[in-house]
Amino acid sequence: MTRFVYSPHYVVNIGDHVFPTRKFGLVAERLKDLGEFIEPQPASRRDLLLAHEQAWVDKALKGVMSLDDETLMELPFSRDLALAHRLSVSGTIMACGRALDYGVGLHIGGGSHHAFADHGEGFCMFNDIAVGIIKMRHERGISRASVVDLDVHQGNGTAALFANEPDVFTFSMHQEDIYPQPKAAGSLDIGLAAGVGDKAYLKSLEANLPKVFEHEPELVVYQAGVDCYEGDVLGGLKLTAQGLRRRDQMVYQECRRRGVGVAVTLGGGYAQDLSQTAALHAQTLLIFAGLEDKILK
Ligand SMILES: [Zn+2]
């Protein structure tokens, strides 16, 4: 039975926003008949402290964010928002655990790769990827992990959080000339020019993905942002739905072939048409669920 990690509380009212949280609900809607949903509980303070500084965690949990904090995060703070982000951290922890137990963990959420130890940025409050990896290293006896971050934006928070951790390899392939500026230095950063389409993108992925596995990870966390899509409002890459499908297949096949557990998180996606974004996220999860035949055209 396929299990998707999801909480209906990911959908939070943040007003008219380029990142409507409704997208999580729309992805869930597409997948609800294809598997069972398992719900995370809010991440504990202790778990958040695995990757974050106490002052930042306290601000979020006590609800005392400043206007500067919110501006940097590009999100209007609320208790519901903090809850959603804590749940999402826990969701990625669950997906990492399932990746180690069953080979694949599927999270209808997560991928908050712009969150740093001491602040949030770019729609991200907590770095669920970093917390998930650190928790698995502490509690599941693994030491080596890799992040494959294919969101159109560089995974700056994740790169910074693991900058001094040689056992965690952070790979990000992204568009070079957009946020974040400057980029943080990860283990392997590939910056692509605006306008790059399927062919050049997939060629670059094919050349670079094996380097992730040379690191011999025991766990891969995949940030599968679909903002590389040609119809994306924030990104300038030109991948088609078919190109994204091939991208996800490549990551899935590499992990499977090498027997490395992979936790999938959604990341960004800002197509003009929200249902298109949801369809692309669902496509990713179905590929990793081994249910490619259920992808709707
Ligand atoms: Zn993004």
Image (tube, rainbow, N blue to C red):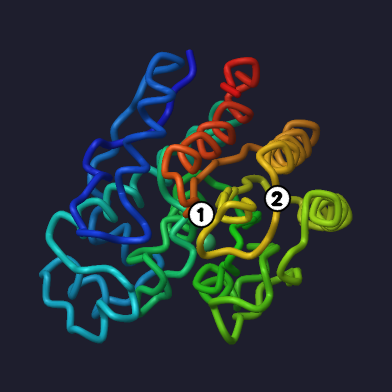
Any part of residue 152 in sight: yes
Task: Judge the density around disc 1: few (<14), some (14-19), many (≥20) Cα neighbours within 10 Å.
Answer: many
Q: Pick the residue in front: 31 or 36.
A: 31
Q: Which mark is residue 239?
A: 2
Residue 214 versus residue 189 in the image, above or below: above
Q: Is residue 14 above or below residue 119?
A: above
Q: Residue at x 46, y 15 (%)?
A: 34
Residue 297 image offset from top left, x and y in percent: 60, 24
Q: Amino acid at mark 2?
A: Leu
Mark number displayed over residue 70: none
* The quarter of the displayed image where residue 182 is located: bottom right
> Is ligand 1 closer than 8 angstroms to the Cβ of mark 2?
no
Horizontally, residue 249 falls left or right of residue 275, namely: right
Observer-nearest of 14 and 158: 14
Q: Find out whether the residues at labels 2 and 1 contact each other: C-beta distance under 8 Å.
A: no
For the point 34% across and 49% down, which residue is it?
88
Label 1 sits on residue: 133
Classed neighbour count for the residue bearing mark 2: other residues with Cα under 10 Å, few (<14), some (14–19), many (≥20): many
The answer to whether residue 209 is seen in the rendering is no
Measuring 47% from the left and 54% from the top, which residue is drawn there? Answer: 270
The residue drawn where x is 28% and y is 47% is: 87
Q: Nearer the viewer, mark 2 or mark 1?
A: 2
What x and y, as percent, mark residue 129?
48, 56
Sequence order check, earlier mark of 2 and 1:
1
Which amino acid, mark 1?
Ile
Looking at the image, residue 62 lies above or below residue 228:
below
Q: Secondary structure at mark 2?
A: loop
- Left or right for 44, reference 120: left
Where in the figure is residue 191, as x and y percent of width and height? 73, 72
Residue nearer the viewer, 134 or 69: 69
